[in-house]
C-alpha cells in the first residue's frame, strides 16, 4: 500500500506511531523499534516520505509495519532554505486544510508537489497550486472563468475572495476591494486551473506577483476554515 507519512510520534521505548494517508483513507501504523538507530526504516521517520508499506497483522490497535520500500523522500542532498520551507509548507497544508477523514484526497497532489520541488520547479507556484487544490477539496472552489455575479467573461476588473471569484466592471460594488492587478488575477486563474505541478508558465510572472497571490490564498484558506498556515509566511519574505 502506498502511503504518505504526515506526522509521527514516539511510543514506548523506541517504537514509532505514524499518522499517514493512503490513496483511500487516513491511517495510523506502528513500527517496532522504529527509532532504533539500527532500524532499517529510519528513513521513514520524516513527514512527507512516500513509501510502499506492508503490515504484519491487524490484531492490535495499530497495524504493525512488516516491510517498507522508499518511493520518494523530501530529503535530498542539496537542501536549500526555500526548499526546506516549501516542504514545511506542504506538511502544514497536508495536516491542516482538510479534516482528518478527508486528508487522503490530497494524496496525488502532495506526491506531485514534492516531486515537482525535487525537480527544481518554481516553489512559489508549486505551493500555490497545492493550496488552491486543497481549498477546492475543502469546498472553497473559486470562479476563475467568468464574473461570479453575472457570468460575463469580458471586462473582469477585480477578484473578490469574499464573493468567490472574478467580478466584472458592471458588478463591481463600492465595498469590494479591487487590489489585485490584471497580471495577478491571471495568475490566480492559472493556479486554480493548472493541470499539473510542472509550472511551465512560471517564467511569465514576477516573484512579487507570485507572493501576492500565495499570500491571498493563505488568507482565503485561513478565513474559510480557521486554520493558521504560519509556515508559509517563510516563503513570502
Ligand atoms: Zn458581472
Image (cartoon, helix red, strand yellow):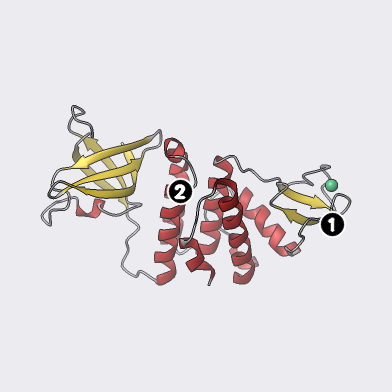
Which residue in the structure is indicated by mark 2? 96
Q: Which mark is residue 219?
A: none
Residue 231's x, y, as percent? Answer: 45, 62
**In this picture, residue 162 sits left or right of residue 140:** right
Residue in view at x 47 percent, y 43 percent? 106
Q: Quadrant of residue 199?
A: bottom right
Work out whether 89 lies above or below 5.
below
Residue 182's x, y, as percent? Answer: 75, 62
**In this picture, residue 20 sits left or right of residue 162:** left
Residue 201 appears in the figure: no
Along the line of sight, the residue nearer the viewer: 94 or 197: 94
Residue in view at x 72 percent, y 64 percent? 183
Residue in view at x 46 percent, y 48 percent? 96
Give the farthest residue toward the right: 170
Along the line of sight, the residue nearer the viewer: 171 or 209: 171
Residue 64 appears in the figure: yes
Give the farthest residue toward the top: 59
* Distance (Cα) linking label 1 and label 2: 34 Å
Residue 162's x, y, as percent? Answer: 70, 50
**Of the residues tagged 1 and 2, which is closer to the observer?**
1
Mark 1 or mark 2, earlier in chain? 2
Label 1: state its secondary structure.
loop
Which residue in the structure is indicated by mark 1? 174
Amino acid at each position: 500500500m502506498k502511503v504518505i507519512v504526515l506526522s509521527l510520534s514516539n511510543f514506548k521505548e523506541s517504537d514509532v506511531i505514524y499518522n499517514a494517508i493512503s490513496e483511500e483513507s487516513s491511517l495510523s501504523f506502528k513500527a517496532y523499534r522504529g527509532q532504533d538507530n539500527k532500524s532499517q526504516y529510519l528513513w521513514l521517520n520524516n513527514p512527507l516520505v512516500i513509501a510502499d508499506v506492508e503490515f504484519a497483522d491487524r490484531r492490535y490497535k495499530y497495524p504493525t509495519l512488516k516491510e517498507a520500500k522508499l518511493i520518494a523522500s523530501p530529503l535530498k542532498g542539496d537542501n536549500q532554505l526555500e526548499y526546506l520551507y516549501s516542504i514545511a509548507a506542504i506538511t502544514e497544508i497536508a495536516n491542516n486544510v482538510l479534516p482528518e477523514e478527508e486528508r487522503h484526497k490530497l494524496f496525488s497532489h502532495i506526491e506531485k508537489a514534492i516531486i515537482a520541488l525535487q525537480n527544481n520547479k518554481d516553489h512559489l507556484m508549486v505551493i500555490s497550486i497545492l493550496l488552491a487544490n486543497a481549498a477546492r477539496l475543502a469546498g472553497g472552489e473559486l470562479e476563475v472563468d467568468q464574473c461570479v455575479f453575472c457570468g460575463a467573461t469580458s471586462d473582469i476588473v477585480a477578484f473578490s475572495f469574499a464573493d468567490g471569484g472574478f467580478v466584472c466592471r458592471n458588478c463591481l460594488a463600492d465595498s469590494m476591494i479591487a487590489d489585485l492587478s490584471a497580471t495577478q488575477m491571471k495568475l490566480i486563474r492559472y493556479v486554480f486551473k493548472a493541470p499539473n505541478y510542472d509550472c511551465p508558465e512560471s517564467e511569465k510572472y514576477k516573484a512579487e506577483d507570485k507572493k501576492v497571490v500565495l499570500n491571498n490564498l493563505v488568507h482565503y484558506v485561513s478565513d474559510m476554515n480557521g486554520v493558521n498556515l504560519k509556515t508559509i509566511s517563510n516563503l513570502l519574505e
